[in-house]
Amino acid sequence: MPTRRNAIRRRLTAMSALSSSFALLLACAAFLAWELITFRKSLVDDLTADARALAFSVTAPLLFDDPEAARTSLQALKAKPRIHSALVAGKGMTVFATYGQPDVNVSPLTQPSTALRYEFKPDRLLLSVPVLSEGSLIGTLTLESSLDELDRRIGQYLLLTGTVLLVALLAALGISSRLQRRIVQPITRLTDAARQVSRNADYSVRVDAMADDELGVLGTAFNDMLAKLEQQKAIREASRLKSEFLANMSHELRTPLNAIIGFTELMYAGKLGPLAPEHHEYLGDILTSARHLLQLINDVLDLAKVESGKMEFRPERVDLARLIGEVRDILRGLAASKRLRVETELDPDVAFAVVDPARVKQVLYNYVSNAIKFTPEGGRIVIRVAAQGPDLFRLDVEDTGIGIPPEHLGKLFVEFQQLDASAAKKFQGTGLGLALTKRIVEAHGGRVEVRSTPGKGSTFSAILPRAMTAAPQPHPPAVLPTAANRPVLVLDDDPAALKLVETTLRQMGYRSVCAHSAEEALQAAEADPPAIVVVDLLMPGIDGFEFISRFTRLPAGRGVPIIIWTMKDLSAGERETLRASTQAIVSKSGIADLVETLRPFLAAAQDGAHGT
Amino acid sequence: MAKGVTGLICILITTVAAAEEPSEYEVKAAFLFNFSKFVEWPEGTFAGAADRITICILGQDPFGTLLEDAVRDKRVNGREISIQKTASVSRVAGCHVVFIASSEQDRLDEILGRLVDRPLLTVSDAESGAERGAIIGLTVDDKRVRFEVNLNAARRARLKLSSQLLKVAVRLIGQREQGP
C-alpha cells in the first residue's frame, strides 16, 4: 500500500525533475552552443590579427626572396604558444619559409587567394591570409593554431553546466517537494477518508478544511456527499424500522381483531343464543367496523410488502369467470343494498389466465367496491374482460358513478391521497386501495388505467399478462383416515384464538383439545390421539414447524391431517415444506375460512367413525 | 584524425624552386622595382599624387627589356613607374631611383659625390657599392642576389627606408636612425 499511496507524489517529483532538467539542459545546451560559436569566432579573429601582422613582416622577405628573413619574422610566433606552425608560400605555391612542423601537404589553404580563409579541424584551426604587395598577391601565410584553449573552455563549461544542472535540479526537487505537499497531502487525506468510509461504512468521517483550490472544492464536495449519504442511511434505517414496526403492529393488531370478529360472527349468527333485534343490529355494526379495520390493516401490510419487494406471487391457471363470480358474491350484499346492477361481460378468448388468483381478486374487489361506493342508487356496474393483444388481457370495471374530474385522475393511484376529506368520511375509503391495486398490477407485470367523465361514470382498468409464470400443480386433497370420536387438537399460543376455535367447533358439534404450547400439544396428542390438528406457526419456544415435524413422528400423529391456521405470511419455500406434511394453510382472519376448510376433514373424520 | 582526407583540394606544394631559374638581371630588375615600395621620399619630391616614379639607368643598361617587363602595369602607392636611360650624371633631374650600372664602376665615387644630398635612391650594381656611398649596393652571393644598405647615405639623401627592407638587407652600413 505505501508504494501505491506515494504513487502520485513520486510521479509529481519525477515530472518536476524531468521538466526542470529538460529546461535546464536545453538552456545550457543553447548557452554552450552560443559560447562555442562566439569563442570560435574570437579564435579566428585573434588568429587573423596575428596572421595579418605576420604577413606584413614577410612581405619584404618575399619580395627580396629572403627566406631567412621570413623565418626570422616567423620566430616571433614563439610568443604565441597556441600557434603550432606557420607556413609562408610564395607566389608559385612554393614553400618559402616555415615555422614549426606545418602539415604542408594537406593544407589546402596554401592555395593562392586574396581572400582570408580558415578551416576548423577536429584538433586545430588552420587560417590563411594573402601576402600582398601593392595590391598584388605575392604569397600566402598559413597559421595552424591548436584548439586546446577551446577544449579547455568547453571542459570548463561542461563542468560548470553540470554543476549548475545538479544544483538547480536539487533546488527544483526541494521546491517541488514542498509545493507537492500542498497537493499530495490533501489527496492523501481524501484517500484515507474514502478508504475509511468504504472499509467501515462510516459516513461520519469528514475531511478537514483544505485550501481554496480545486482540491478544496473536491474535499468540500466529498464532505457534502458523505453528509448526504449519512442522511440517506439514517432515512433508510428509519424507513426500515418504520416498515418493521408497521409489519409488527399490523400483525399485533390483527390478533385481537381476529378474536373480536370471530366471536362477533358467532354471536351475530345466533350461535350463542337468541338476540334482541337491536343487539343483532349492533353486532352487525361491530362486524362491519371490525372487518373494515382488518381490511385497512391488511392493505397497510400489503403496501409495505409490495414496497419492500417482499410480496410473493403464486400464479396458477385461473378461470376468470369463476374469479369474477367469487368477487361478485362477496360484494353482492353491498351492491344490493344500493340497488345496483352488476353485469359481467367476458371475452371467450380469455376464459383462463395464469395469475395469482388472490391478488387479482384483490384488484377486482378494490375496483368493484370502489365502483359500488361511488355509484348512486339504481346505477349499473359492468365487469368486463377483454383480450389486449396476444399476451395481455384487460379487466375493466365500468360504473355510472359521479366520475372524477380530470385534474384528479393523476392522484388516484397515489397512496394516502383521497380526493377529499368529505369523500373519505362518506365513503369510508382507506386511501390505500387504489395505490395497492396499482402496485399489485405493476408487480404482476401489468399496468392500471382510468377513464372518467364527471357526472357520467368512470372505468378502471387493469391490464395484465395472460400468463405470469407456469402455474404449479394444485396439491391433491389428502385421504383422510380417522377414528371415531377423536378430537380436533388446536395449538395456538393466543388464548383468545384457542377459545374461538373451541367455541366454534363446539357449536358445530365437535370436540376439541386446546394446547398453548407445542409440548402441551404433543402430550395431549399421545394421551388423546386427535382426528385433525389445527396449528399456528408463530409461537414462543417450539414453533409450528418444529411441532409438525415432531408430531408426524409420533404413532398418534401418523396420517392425521394438519391444518395451518396462521397470520404468518409464508414464503414459497416454507409453503413448499408445509405442503408435504400438511393438508391446508388458512389465513388467520376471522374464523369463517377455517370452518370452511375444516368442514370436509370433519365430515371425513365422522364418516370414518361411522364406518368403524 | 583523417589527415589528408578533406573535402578541399589538396595541393602539393613543390619545395624545389621553379623549373626555370630566373636570371640574375631578372631578379635585379624586380629588386629595383621593389625597393621603391619601401622608400619614402621627402615631401615635395612629387608634384602631384599621380606623378610617376622614374627609375633612371646610369651607364650601360644591363637589363635589356627585363626592367620594362618587371614594371609593366605595376604601381607603387598609386604611381606608375617609368624608366629612363641617362648617359650622364648631370641629367638625373626628375629621377627618383638611380641605377648605377657596373659599367660605371670606376666612376662610382665621382657619380655618388655629385648625387649626394639629393633625394635620390642610389642603387649600385658595382662591387661594394654601398660601402662606397650608394644607398643600396647589390651583391651576388652564391648566385643569389642580395643587397647592402648604407644608412648614412640614405639619411643624407633624406630618404626614409622601411625597417622591413632593412630586415632583408644582408648588411647595414652606418648608424640606424633613432626613434621609430
Image: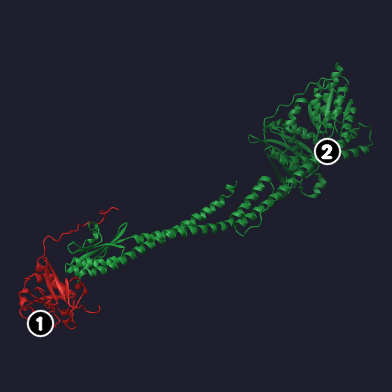
Q: Between residues A33 and A214, which one lies in front from this camera angle?
A: A33
Q: Amino acid at mark 1?
A: Gly
In percent of the image, x 68 and y 53: which residue is there?
A206
Q: Chain of mark 2?
A: A
Q: Measured along the vertical axis of the image, is residue A155 above or below residue A612?
A: below
In percent of the image, x 18 and y 59: which residue is there?
B15
Does any portion of residue B94 appear in the rendered image?
yes
Disc 1 crowd, CA 10 A, few/some/many (<14, 14-19, 20+) = few
Q: Which of the image's four quarters has the C terminus of chain A?
A: top right
**Is the image coloured rainbow, by chain, by secondary structure, or in one colour?**
by chain
- Residue A417 located left or right of residue A529: left
Marks 1 and 2 sit apart, C-alpha to C-alpha, by 167 Å
Chain depicted in green: A
Q: Measured along the vertical axis of the image, is residue A533 above or below residue B153?
A: above
Which tag is nearer the camera, tag 1 or tag 2?
1
Please name the residue that numbered disc 2 is placed on: A254
- Residue A215 located left or right of residue A256: left
Does any portion of residue B59 appear in the rendered image?
no
The image shows residue A537 at horizontal and vertical percentages of 80, 32
Q: Between residues A47 and B115, which one lies in front from this camera angle?
A: B115
For label 1, the SS is: helix
On residue B113, the disc is 1
The image shows residue A376 at horizontal and vertical percentages of 80, 43
In percent of the image, x 83 and y 28: which residue is there?
A534
Quarter holding residue A108: bottom left
The colour of chain B is red
